[in-house]
Image: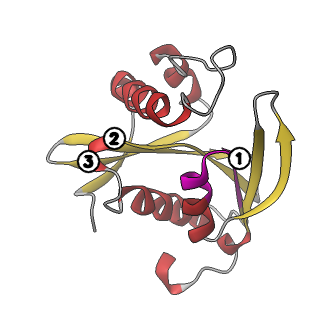
């Protein structure tokens, strides 16, 4: 286990969540998305608080510091959506993103969900590789005017392998 604990976020942590998302998004997506289409900050504290009404944010903590975030949105009784998977730059490539994603998959399973979906920019090859390595497959594309967005689904949520138990 990499994270000392994974906790459900509350509104008092919205500023830290927004900071992690904005800093990480800027470093990785700014070079990919043309300036006219790139939004910074990508999310405000008020938007995080608003999103908390429709999805749950989970945080990886190390030494009392929040180092990663992920969100789960329940779409219906069978399907959920993974949102906002971000890890602070200095903590990346240590297994934190994998641990957060596995945690959300377990959450989805415990709620009876059979599918998870997510959206990734097609130029974000590192993200595409990450989700592919975790059982997600591309099921479609959508043109956003500044690049293609890949639509992903994971049907493994219904039949979990041992790594998710």
- Which mark sits nearer the N-terminus, 2 or 3? 3
Q: Position of residue 142 (x, y in %)?
A: 85, 41
Any magenta on residue 120? Answer: yes
Any magenta on residue 72? Answer: no
Query: Element type at marker 1?
Result: loop
Q: Position of residue 128 (x, y in %)?
A: 62, 56
Q: Which residue is mark 2?
A: 88
Residue beneath the point at 37% across and 25% down: 19
Horizontally, residue 122 falls left or right of residue 6, namely right
Residue 145 is drawn in which quadrant? top right
Range of magenta residues:
116-128
Q: Depth check: give the residue in front, 28 or 103.
A: 28
In the current view of this chain or complex, which residue is farthest to the bottom?
162
Residue beneath the point at 78% across and 41% down: 148
Q: Depth check: give the residue in front, 156 or 148.
A: 148
| Residue 134 appears in the picture as rendered | no
Q: Crowding at label 2, few (<14), some or many (≥20) Cα neighbours within 10 Å?
A: some
Residue 130 is drawn in which quadrant? bottom right
- Which mark sits nearer the N-terminus, 3 or 1? 3
- Label 2 to label 3, Cα distance in Å? 11 Å
Q: Position of residue 42 (x, y in %)?
A: 55, 22
Residue beneath the point at 60% across and 79% down: 160
Q: Is residue 132 above or below residue 37?
A: below
Query: Element type at marker 3?
Result: strand
Residue 122, label in figure:
1
- Mark count: 3
Q: Position of residue 16 (x, y in %)?
A: 33, 27
Q: Which residue is mark 3?
A: 61
């Amino acid at each position: 286990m990499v994270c000392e604990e994974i906790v459900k976020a509350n509104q008092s942590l919205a500023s830290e969540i927004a900071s992690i998302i904005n800093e990480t998004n800027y470093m990785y997506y700014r070079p990919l998305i043309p300036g006219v289409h790139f939004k910074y900050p990508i999310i405000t504290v008020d938007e995080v608080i608003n999103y908390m009404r429709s999805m749950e944010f989970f945080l990886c903590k190390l030494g009392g510091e929040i180092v990663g975030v992920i969100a789960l949105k329940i779409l219906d009784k069978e399907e959920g959506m993974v949102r906002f998977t971000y890890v602070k730059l200095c903590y990346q490539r240590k297994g934190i993103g994998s641990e957060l994603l596995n945690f959300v998959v377990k959450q989805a399973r415990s709620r009876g969900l059979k599918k998870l979906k997510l959206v990734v920019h097609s130029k974000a090859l590192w993200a595409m590789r990450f989700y592919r390595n975790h059982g997600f497959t591309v099921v479609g594309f959508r043109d956003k005017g500044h690049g293609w967005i890949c639509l992903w689904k994971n049907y493994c949520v219904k039949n979990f392998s041992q790594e998710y138990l």
